[in-house]
Amino acid sequence: MAKASCTFAGEEGVKGLLTFSQAQEDASTIIEGQISGLRPGRHGLHVHIFGDFSEGLTSAGGIFNPFGKNHGAPDDEERMVGDLGNVEADEEGVCKIAIEDSLVKLIGPHSVIGRSIIVKANEDDLGRGGHELSLSTGNSGARVAGGVIGIAPSK
């Protein structure tokens, strides 16, 4: 069993904690937690290449895409590993997250440990919006908060 966690921090008080668990390399990864301080509504959520915020959220690089795919929805055959779709913040700006993903891995050559997760200002169009950014970022807007995915103890 591999476990990881990610503490979020961002603009205007956005904060949160996500935990990750994966039983074995060929199993899906479970991502659970909460982010608060968001504008109510839908927000894109992506795993990014680097766990580096030395120059703000932009130094995290692009969405994690080791197989050279276009941007898509979490259930699409054509999608980047880091494409986690949208999360929804309620009227108080709180977003509860419960994701099971077969491409995000903690174990193996394409592990996301040491990479980052970023929440975006707007809804991700899942590569279907027809905008020039749809197939690269889902046209989901500015990066509002992020955190580095780090190894957590297996309990």
Image: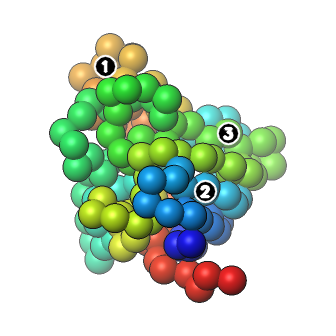
Residue at image mark 2: 31
Residue at image mark 3: 88
Horizontal arrangement in the rendering, residue 94 relative to residue 22 (left or right)? right
Q: Earlier in the sequence, mark 1 or mark 3?
A: 3
Instruction: Provide the secondary structure element on which disc 3 rests.
Output: strand
Position of 93 relative to 117 (above/below):
above
How far apart are the alpha carbons under marks 2 and 3?
Answer: 15 Å
Q: Residue furthest top?
A: 130
Query: Could you say where residue 31 lies in the image, as x and y percent from the top left?
Result: 60, 56
Residue at image mark 1: 131
Which mark is on residue 75?
A: none
Q: Amino acid at mark 1?
A: His
How far apart are the alpha carbons under marks 1 and 3?
Answer: 22 Å
Q: Amino acid at mark 3?
A: Glu
Q: Amino acid at mark 2?
A: Ile
Horizontal arrangement in the rendering, residue 99 relative to residue 124 (left or right)? right
Q: Earlier in the sequence, mark 2 or mark 3?
A: 2
Q: Residue furthest left?
A: 68
User: How busy is the neighbourhood of tag 1: few (under 14 within 10 Å), some, or many (20 plus)?
Assistant: few
Horizontal arrangement in the rendering, residue 89 relative to residue 111 (left or right)? right
What residue is at 49 percent from the left and 29 percent from the top? 75
Query: Could you say where residue 155 lies in the image, as x and y percent from the top left?
Result: 68, 83
* Number of numbered labels in the structure image: 3
Horizontal arrangement in the rendering, residue 55 relative to residue 76 (left or right)? left
Labels 2 and 1 touching (C-beta < 8 A): no
Position of 18 relative to 87 (above/below):
below
What residue is at 41 percent from the left and 66 percent from the top? 107
What residue is at 30 percent from the left and 59 percent from the top? 110
What residue is at 43 percent from the left and 60 percent from the top? 25
